[in-house]
Image (cartoon, helix red, strand yellow):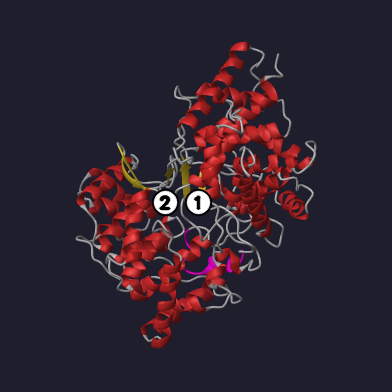
Amino acid sequence: MSAPAESLADPDQKAAVGAALIAGREHLRGLQNPDGWWKGELETNVTMDAEDLLLRHILGIRGDAETERAAVWIRSQQRADGTWANFADGPADLSTTVEAYVALRLAGDDTEAPHLAKAAQFIRNEGGLAASRVFTRMWLAMVGQWSWDELPVLPPELIYLPKWVPLNVYDFACWARQTIVPLTIVSTLRPVHPLPFDLAELHTGRLRPTRSPLLSWARGFELLDWVLHRYGRHPVQPLRRAAMARAAEWIIRRQEADGCWGGIQPPWVYSLIALHSLGYPLEHPVLARGIAGLDGFVVDDEHGRRLEACQSPVWDTALAVIALADAGVPAEDPGLRAAGSWLLAEEITTRGDWAVRRPDLAPGGWAFEFHNDGYPDIDDTAEVVLALRRVAGSTALAAAAGRGVAWSTGMASSDGGWAAFDADNTRELAYQIPFADFGAMIDPPSADVTAHMVEMLAAEGQAASPAAQRGVQWLLAHQEPDGSWFGRWGANYVYGTGAVIPALVAAGLGRSHPAIRRAIDWLGQVQNADGGWGEDLRSYDDARRPELAERSQQIWSGRGESTASQTAWAMLALIAAGQDSPALHRGASWLARTQRADGTWDEPQFTGTGFPGDFYINYHLYRLVFPVMALGRYQREHLEAVS
C-alpha cells in the first residue's frame, strides 16, 4: 500500500515542485548543441572497451596511450569481488569478466595482482573460458586463445538463401543480420592474431555440454553444425569464393557516411575484421573510414576512455523537444526551431533493408543515430513526428512529418503491432542456431513501440484509423496478468506501462476502462516507500522464467531503487489516466526532493535496454528529459488546480 499523500496545498511544496521544473528545463536547454541537437552519453558495459582493444590488436593499431586510458575505465568498473557486471549493481557476468580480464592483461596488469587474481578465481569457479558465451570465445579464437574448431560455423553461402527460405539473412533482426554477414567471413577465414601471453590460468578442464535432447531443434542444429564443419574443410571452392565476395559487397554497401555500420558497435567491429581478413589494407577507404569513425564514439574524461556502443542524437533531440514543450517552452522558441530544422535534415528518404518486407512502401523516417540511413526505425520516427508537431515550423516540417506517419504506419506487422526496425521479423527459429546465445535475434512487435505509434497516430488525428485501432487491440491483448506491460527497449514493466497508458487514452480508450484501471492499480502497488518508482533490470530474467509468472511470483517486476527516469514514466501514465492521487503527488515530491543543485538528477542505474537479459544501457539524458516531461505535464494538470 502507498503511504498517505504529502499535501500539495502547502505553498512551500508547490514552490519546490515548480522550481524543480524550471531548474530541470533550463539545464536541458543549456545542453543543446549550437546545431540544434541534444545527445547524452550512452553508457554500457566494459565489453565495448575490451573489444575495442582486441580489435585494435587484431588490426595492428593498438597504442599504449589508448590502452592505458581504457584500462583506467575498466578497472574503475570492477567490483570488490573482482567481477564485472552488465549494469550498475547487477549480478556478476562471466563473459564480461573474461573480456575485461583479457583487456587488463593487454594493458600489462599482473596476473598476481589482487584485482586480477580475484577475477581469475571467479572465472574458474564459473567454469572457465569454456563456459563463456560464443561471442567471447570467438574473440578468444581470433587472438589464439581458443580453437576455431570448437566454435559454431556460419557459412558465407548463407548470403545466397532467398527471402522465402527460413534463416535467410532477412529473417534476423537488423542488428543481428549486420553482425552475422561479416561473421560468415570471419568464421570461414579463421584469423588468428596471437596475444603476447596466454590465458592458461582461466582454463578448468571442464567442457561445455555439447548434446541437446535428441528430438529438439537444438540437436538438429548441432548436427547441421557438424556437417558444416566438415563441408568447411572441403567446400565447393567456386561457390565459396563467390559467396565471400557477395558477403563483402553486402557489407561495403551498408557502410554509413561516418564509417560505421548501422551506427552500432557489433557489426562495425566485425565488418572491419572481416574485410581486413579478406586482405583489404588499412589504407583502403572503407577500412580507413571505419577506423577513423570509431574516434567519434569515444568518451575520454577523468574516469578513463570508453567507447559508446551507439549514439542517440535523434532520439534524444525528439524527447528533449517534447519535454521542453511540456515544460512551457513555446513553439516559436529559437531552440525548438533549431531542433526542428536539424531533425528535418536528418530525415531518411532512401530505401533500406526494411523494404525487403515492404517493397511498395515509400521511404520517410528517422534513425536513432547521426548516421544510419539504411535502418530508420519506427520508434524514433513516432517520437520525431510528435516533436515536430510541437515546433512552429514550415511547410517542409509538416511534409516531413506526413512522410514519417505514412512510412511508420506502413511498417506495422501483420498482427497489428509495431517492431523497432522491420515488419514481421518474427521467426523464432533464429534462436536455435548455435551462435544465438547472446541477445535478441529477431525484432517482433513490442508494447512500447506500438504504444508510441498509437500515441503519434492519435496526435495526428488518426485515432480512429484501422492502423491505430489494430494497435490498440494489440496492446490490450498483450497486457500482463498483473496489469502492466512489458518494456522491450526500456526497463521494463514500468517503461512499458508508462508508454501504453498515455497511448490508450490518446486513442480514445476511457480512463475507467478495466485495462487502464488494472495498470494504475499495479503502479500503485509497486511504488516505493520514498514516493519514487524503480525497476531492477533483473525483471527481464523473471520474464524468462514462466514458472514465476504462473505462480505470480515475479521477483523484480516493478521493483528496484527509485530512479528519476522510472519515476517520470510512472507519473506520465498516472497523469494520462487522469489520476489526482497520493501516488502521483508523492512521485512529484520525490523528483523535487532528489533533484541536484544544477537541475538534473543522479541516476547511476541503467534504465535502457539493448537486448533483454543480456545488454543494457544508461542513457545519460533520461535522468533529465523524462522528469522535465513529467513535471511539465504535472504542473499543467495539477499545480494550478491545487489551492
Q: Which residue is mark 1?
A: 610
Q: Which residue is mark 2?
A: 309
What amino acid is labelled 1 in the image?
A: Gly
**What percent of the width, then of the height, locates residue 121?**
30, 50
Decide if residue 355 is on the left or right side of residue 136: right
Q: Compared to 593, does 316 lie above or below?
A: below
Q: CA distance from mark 1 to mark 2?
A: 10 Å
Secondary structure of the residue carrying numbered label 2: loop
Decide if residue 23 is on the left or right side of residue 69: right
Secondary structure of the residue carrying numbered label 1: strand
Residue found at x 22% / y 53%: 63
Q: In this view of the protein, which residue sits in the foreground, 410 or 573?
A: 410
Question: Outermost residue, top direction?
Answer: 11
Residue found at x 63% / y 12%: 10
Specify start and end residues of the magenta stretch as a single range: 426-438
Q: Quadrant of residue 630?
A: top right
What amino acid is labelled 2 in the image?
A: Ala
Earlier sequence position, callout 1 versus callout 2: 2
Q: Quadrant of residue 329?
A: top right
**What percent of the width, then of the height, locates residue 33?**
44, 38
Q: Are marks 1 and 2 in contact (CB under 8 Å)?
A: yes
